[in-house]
Image (spheres, rainbow, N blue to C red):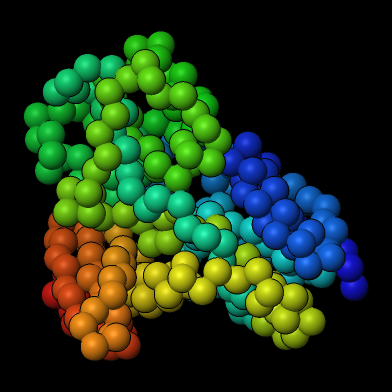
Amino acid sequence: MNHMIIASRGSRLSLRQDEIVSEELKKTGIDTEIRVVRTRGDLDTKHALKDIGGSGLFIREVEEVLHRHEADIAVHSAKDLPYDLKDGMTIAAVMPAAAAADLLVMRKENPHLIGTGSARREAEIRRIFPDAEIRGLRGNIETRVRKLREGDYDAIVIAEAGIDRLQVNLSAFQVRKLTPEEMVPACGQGIIAIECRADDKENIDRLSAINNEETMKRFLPERYLFGLLRADCSMPVGAHAVIRAGQKGDEEITLYALYLDKKDRISGRYKDYKELCRKLADRVM
């Protein structure tokens, strides 16, 4: 089979991520077509994610298309993945990661009115700007930047990866890149994940040819930690891993976690990441 149908959301960012995957598959001789799927998170753009609640707001309908064999693979922003995939599904590959950080994009310093629809971002922003008003903000990247430009907000919080992939011009604003200590990123932020049916050995083999091993090293501990936290979009939760070369050839990892009103980090050897994740989850939960 030299043709794949990709199930995906229809936002400009989602389609750009589809292009990235399609370009890599084309190098292996596989052509693709896109099947756009509207998700519950896309249909309700008025309410904050924490108010909609639930798990997999931007994923479940896409997984259903995959489950019904109406598509061969699904392309996701890894940060949208719930801690549990639909039964019978697996993440077979990831693309090279973009930046994991969040950006605080401001019309002026010391913003009073800050927009976000994310419980995680809201919790962290309240630590940085305890006197600021946080107001709900949903919509695609272009919509959020437009509302900032029009003066609806003094600042917004947005993922650096989306800005970079869509090449959004932020030169009219002050931009502050938030460190993991300031704002723990969402699990898998900046990573494109490719899902397929777990029993689809043919496509799993094809996807292995485009899998980025360095990104997978980060993806696995973040997903493991996120699974221990067992959170959904209504909860302020973050999970992030930073991997570095260590002494004697061992890689080292620093794990960051946010859970409700608690945050912490832990460091150790990468090969011990599951034990480190369990210790960190115990601390914050």
Please tell me in which quadrant of the rendered image residue 126 appears. top left
Residue at the image position 32 percent from the left and 54 percent from the top: 185
* 44 horizontally vs 242: left or right: right
Residue at the image position 62 percent from the left and 75 percent from the top: 92
Please tell me in which quadrant of the rendered image residue 65 appears. bottom right
* 141 horizontally vs 136: left or right: right
Which residue is at the front of the view, 209 or 137? Answer: 209
Residue 67 spot, x, y in % from top left: 74, 71
Residue at the image position 75 percent from the left and 85 percent from the top: 201
Q: Quadrant of the C terminus?
A: bottom left
Residue lying farthest to the left in this orientation: 131
Residue at the image position 89 percent from the left and 68 percent from the top: 2
**Does 190 appear above or below 112?**
below
Residue lying farthest to the front in this orientation: 248
Residue 120 spot, x, y in % from top left: 29, 50
Residue lying farthest to the top in this orientation: 150
Residue lying farthest to the right in this orientation: 1
Q: Report whether residue 223 is seen.
A: no
Residue 230 spot, x, y in % from top left: 36, 71
Please tell me in which quadrant of the rendered image residue 135 appears. top left
